[in-house]
Image (tube, rainbow, N blue to C red):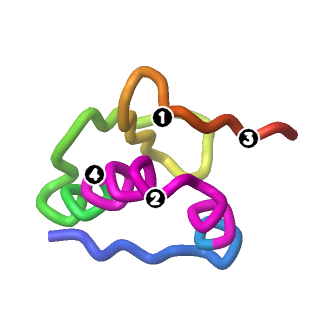
Amino acid sequence: MYRIDFKPRALKDLRAVNVGDRGKILTKIEGLENDLAGDVKRLTNFTPEYRLRIESCLSWRRNG
């Protein structure tokens, strides 16, 4: 079992996402608490050490 902590910047970014996509993201994140379920990849030489793919393309893009 894992515990998910959100940094303030992550919460700010999440509020900028449309409601439909935000729901998809939060559902996938909640799945991580159960033994890193989902499309999770361990990264090397990066922090954080894991990447979670939600979908191949969401309807929002972040510039910068």
C-alpha distance separating marks 2 and 3: 16 Å
Residue on which disc 3 sits: 62
Work out whether mark 3 precedes mark 1 in sequence or the reverse, and give the earlier one. Answer: 1
Work out whether mark 1 precedes mark 4 in sequence or the reverse, and give the earlier one. Answer: 4
Work out whether mark 3 precedes mark 4 in sequence or the reverse, and give the earlier one. Answer: 4
- Whole-percent x, y for residue 45 in the image: 61, 37
- Residue furthest right as drawn: 64
The magenta region covers: 12-28
- Whole-percent x, y for residue 10 in the image: 61, 66
Residue type highlighted by circle 3: Arg
Residue on which disc 2 sits: 19
Residue type highlighted by circle 1: Leu
Q: How crowded is mark 4: few (under 14 residues within 10 Å), some or many (20 or more)?
A: some
Does 32 sit above or below residue 63? Answer: below
Work out whether mark 2 precedes mark 4 in sequence or the reverse, and give the earlier one. Answer: 2
Q: Is mark 1 on a helix, strand or loop?
A: loop
Residue on which disc 1 sits: 43
- Asked if the residue at tag 1 contacts the one at tag 3, i.e. Cβ–Cβ closer than 8 Å, the answer is no
Q: Quadrant of residue 15?
A: bottom right
Which mark is nearer the camera, 3 or 1?
A: 3
Q: Which residue is drawn at 87% across and 40% down?
A: 64
Residue on which disc 4 sits: 28
Q: How crowded is mark 3: few (under 14 residues within 10 Å), some or many (20 or more)?
A: few
- Whole-percent x, y for residue 16 in the image: 66, 60
